[in-house]
Image (spheres, grey):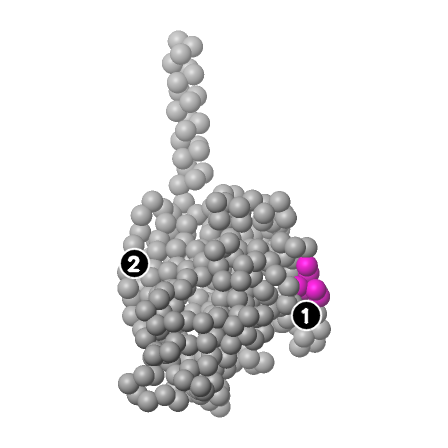
Amino acid sequence: MCFKRNLLLLSFSFVIIFQTFSQEVTLQESSKGMDFLLDGKPILRYQMTKEPVPSGIKDAYSKSGFIHPIQSPSGQILSRIQPEDHYHHYGIWGPYTRATIGGKEVDFWNLGDEKGRVDFSHVLSKKQAGGAAELTVRQNHVDLKAAAESRIAMEEDLRIKVKPADKGRYQVDYTSTLQTSIPGGILLDDYRYGGGIGFRATEVWGDANSTILTSEGKDRATADGSNARWILVTGQSDHPTGKSGILFMSHNTNQAHPEPLRVWPPGQYEGKGNVFIEFCPIRHTSWEIQPGKRYSLNYRMLVFDGELTVQEAENYWKSFVK
């Protein structure tokens, strides 16, 4: 009798544990791109169509190939596109700014200059298994000043994998793999912006209601130009705790790891809607991309509501790179 009672209790406990960790991420194509859903609720979109620009704004600022919106588990929108101060900012994205190709400079970041751009090309693969969902796409880095036959300067295979994490959180693996067929290769010049993974946060966040902290203990005032293994961005939200955020992690195999950062300091744009951070592998040193070779950068994002402690951030990074 005692054995049966214990067996029933064990079975009941297993059901509770299974239900707690049985969240599932699925893929669903929409009119704009590919949506990732956590238990049927949208949490992230990779946009495959070009986003129209506001009336009166140069059409060159319209682009595809970015993540927006990215939402917290409770549905808080954490990213922003086409802010009035930088119409070329697109949620989560990573074009290179200064590249030297055949002796001339190409800018894939500042769309308004119409020297270069990065856009979605086609889907390479998509799959759902084990509660996770994965999308791999081709993005073309286009040299707009080159002859038509050599305009694709670099091909990028971008892999986005989303899976549930503990405490109702979820994680996003973001892997960018570059290659070129340009004779002589491409030099990604050292510059304070470009490449890696950039994040323009919701317009709600500013100096007064958001925080930035790096693995080396740097904050918004001191992080710019420093190196880090991870960077934690937290801000005000409508979640019952009042906060939501994203932990960005750089893999220890990445170029220039621990990676240099670009972080907007306090006071930028009067301290309102001014949260921008980026892992920038070419911040201090140029990077040579040779034809016939493939170069990868691996990042992970941990998306959450409420608080995330420094110890939790460190543990998540260790789990990522182990």
Residue range of the region highlighted in magenta in the rendering: 218-223
Report whether 310 appears left or right of 255: right
Which type of secondary structure does the marked residue at label 1 adopt?
loop
Residue at the disc numbered 1: 265
What residue lies at 45% left-to-right and 87% top-to-bottom? 104
* Mark 1 surroundings: few (<14), some (14-19) or many (≥20) residues within 10 A: some
Q: Please check the rendered image and state whether residue 307 is part of the magenta-colored stretch, yes or no.
A: no
| Of pointers 2 and 1, the one earlier in the residue sequence | 2
Is residue 10 or residue 256 the one in the foreground? 256
Evaluate whether residue 250 shows in this view.
yes
Distance of label 2 from label 1 (alpha carbons): 38 Å
Looking at the image, do the residues carrying marks 2 and 1 touch, with CB atoms under 8 Å apart? Answer: no
Say which residue label 2 marks. Answer: 126
Q: Residue at x 71, y 66 (%)?
A: 221
Q: Quadrant of residue 226?
A: bottom right
The image shows residue 109, relative to residue 19, as above or below, that is below
